[in-house]
Image (spheres, rainbow, N blue to C red):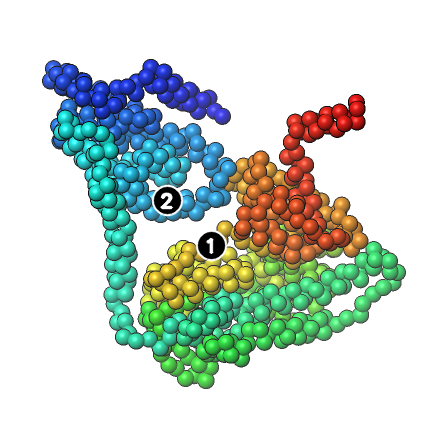
Amino acid sequence: MSLRKLLVIAAIGLAIAAYFTLDLGRFFSLDALKAQQAGIEAYRAANPWLTAAIFFGVYVAVTALSLPGAAIMTLAGGAVFGLLWGTVLVSFASSLGATLAFLAARFLLRDWVKARFGARLAAIDRGVEKDGGFYLFTLRLVPAFPFFMINLVMGLTPMRAWTFYWVSQVGMLAGTLVFVNAGTQLAGIRSLSGILSPALIGSFALLGIFPLIAKKIVDGVKAKQVYARWTRPATFDRNIIVIGGGSAGLVTAYIAAAVKAKVTLIEKHKLGGDCLNTGCVPSKALIRSAKFLSHIARAEEFGFRRTTSADFQFSEVMERVQRVVTTVEPHDSVERYTGLGVDVIEGSAKIVSPWEVELTRHNGATERMSTRSIVIAAGARPFVPPIPGIEEVGYLTSDNVWELRELPKRLVVLGGGPIGCELTQSFARFGARVSQVEMLPRLMIREDPEVSELVAARFRNEGIDVLLNHKAMRFVVENGEKALIAEHEGREVRIPFDAVLVAVGRVANLKGYGLEDIGVSTTRTVDTNDFLQTNYPNIYAAGDVAGPYQFTHTAAHQAWYAAVNALFDPFKKFRADYSVIPWATFVEPEVARVGLNETEAKEKGIAYEVARYDIDDLDRAIADSEAHGFIKVLTVPGKDRILGVTIVGEHAGDLIAEYVLAMKHGIGLNKILGTIHIYPTLAEANKYVAGVWKKAHAPEGLLRWVARFHAWRRGE
């Protein structure tokens, strides 16, 4: 703790100690005020400005230190200075004192609270940044809320001090007037409780509720302004129209049909979206075939002769990938969703008004449908950077790489993120000479450095040329040979290739849906609020087109909120919950994560402890010849509450599920340790890392006494 904080704590402590030691509280009672009223008024008559200054200073001190007595001093303001000047003095003194208490709480406690509870308070902080002044105003209007507590709690939020001051000044004015006015009739007051009668408290409560009602009215007015240029249909053809048949769109339509709403799902390509057709399913099929080949290359580890080999044609591998897609396809088919009650239409959709969608079928026929709500689930596409020469050399992306039937001899992969890493390793295992080009200093930049190092080491061991800190400058064709010119440490590096795969990220599909025509707000994605509503409250967005995560499982997660809110607002709606989002990268070693990792915890200033278990010690991993990787769990210091987990190793994406459940439902490491895990399984590692945490938090003092107890029982 800094010297300044210690000095502030000491000063506050001394002031509070003096208050109680000297029994200064005896001066802040109703009887004391009545007894001294005449003397105080006489002193004020003789020294008006000095009396006002003393009163102001004492009031500021009392409220700044959160001492009892503010109510009595407010009465005194009315009794001594009258309604006008008493209100002026009390209003400014109480607001200034409250702001000092606010600043003291922020200075002394904000960093500590943020370090211990930062992740849990993130949503509150966002709410305060957005509407903090409004909610502070409603609290200030109701004297039943302890004002000193409001001062201290608000100091722990990111609210600006000036906002806190002026909102407090305005919000406390009504209560100040009541107390100051009561003070002008001091002789008739028998107790403080008599000032705030149940009827008066009820009135203040209604006054406090009024801003909430006003906010609803304002929101309604804003919505009316948004809709002003449109004519709302008298009736609707549909309850909901969903644009896009990927994960978010399919789940939205499924939920709507399940609750008997009339729902239309429009998809212009293939149902299943990227995940089924060009993403998750084909990539995992390719990864599985590549992994089989890698096991053959490791034959001696499993007791086979070195001459073991596999004869394969790359084209046949890619045909298997397509067979897998075809096998999974019925899960997302038109027939299935039609059977569930969804009106599935193959064609393109354009929003022409907040309640109307124009449909163009594949045969060219057009029609216009009306709907109460619209959900935009248009997905995303690979981002292709405007690197000079890229169009001339031609390029692959995660969309069209599945059309390959001949393995490139030399492949350049641009990008070191999850997609780039998964495809890099797969193609290398099939025999391509792969150069992975990443402009950042490490692969998989969102993970901890040690994770990046493990993956990069494995890649290099498998013959992949991992080129970090290489910035792609231009593509050229020289003497019939394609090459990438990259910059590395101030010099140009030439990287020849036969094919280039671009995997540098994905960009939301925002064009062609009429969003810009009707004024749906977009930036890099469709802009939505916490309820997944756009600036048109009846138009929602979910999945990759909305962000902030581009995972199939988060798209499905968002779809629940979009569907329920679209169907049942204004009667009920739910804020989308992103508190526990897991993900995995299916390279070897496999990487999975949920919650914070060490890099993020340090960046956010969140205090944590680490429990780590190395999987090379696990019996099943040894038996499977997969004894590599680790589990790292971040917990609240001194507690078993989980802040985040990183797993590197075989089936990490499956092992992480136990921690996702634990974090979602508040289960700590103690309960994981007390849960039976089958032997021998990889899942035992989850129990063992909980044991590592328990050992680090063993009650050493108690154990010493237990050792003495056992020694006594042995007769020693």
SS class, disc 1:
loop
Residue closer to the observer: 486 or 418: 418
**In this view of the protein, which residue sits in the foreground, 318 or 50?**
50
Would residue 68 be found to the left or right of residue 497 on screen? left
Name which residue type carries label 2. Val
Residue on which disc 2 sits = 128
Which residue is rendered at x = 78% and y = 49% of the image?
A: 619
Q: x%, y% of residue 280?
A: 60, 65
Above/below status of 660 relative to 634: below
Q: Residue at x 65, y 31 (%)?
A: 699
**Structural crowding at the residue carrying mark 2, measured as other residues with C-alpha within 10 Å and reported as few (<14), some (14–19) or many (≥20):** some
Quadrant position of residue 300: bottom right
The residue carrying pointer 1 sits among few (fewer than 14), some (14 to 19) or many (20 or more) residues within 10 Å by Cα, namely: few
Quadrant of image for the C terminus: top right
Against 547, is 170 above or below? above
Badge 1 is on which residue?
577
Instruction: Answer yes or no: is residue 309 visible.
Output: yes
Residue sitting nearer the eye, 205 or 116:
205
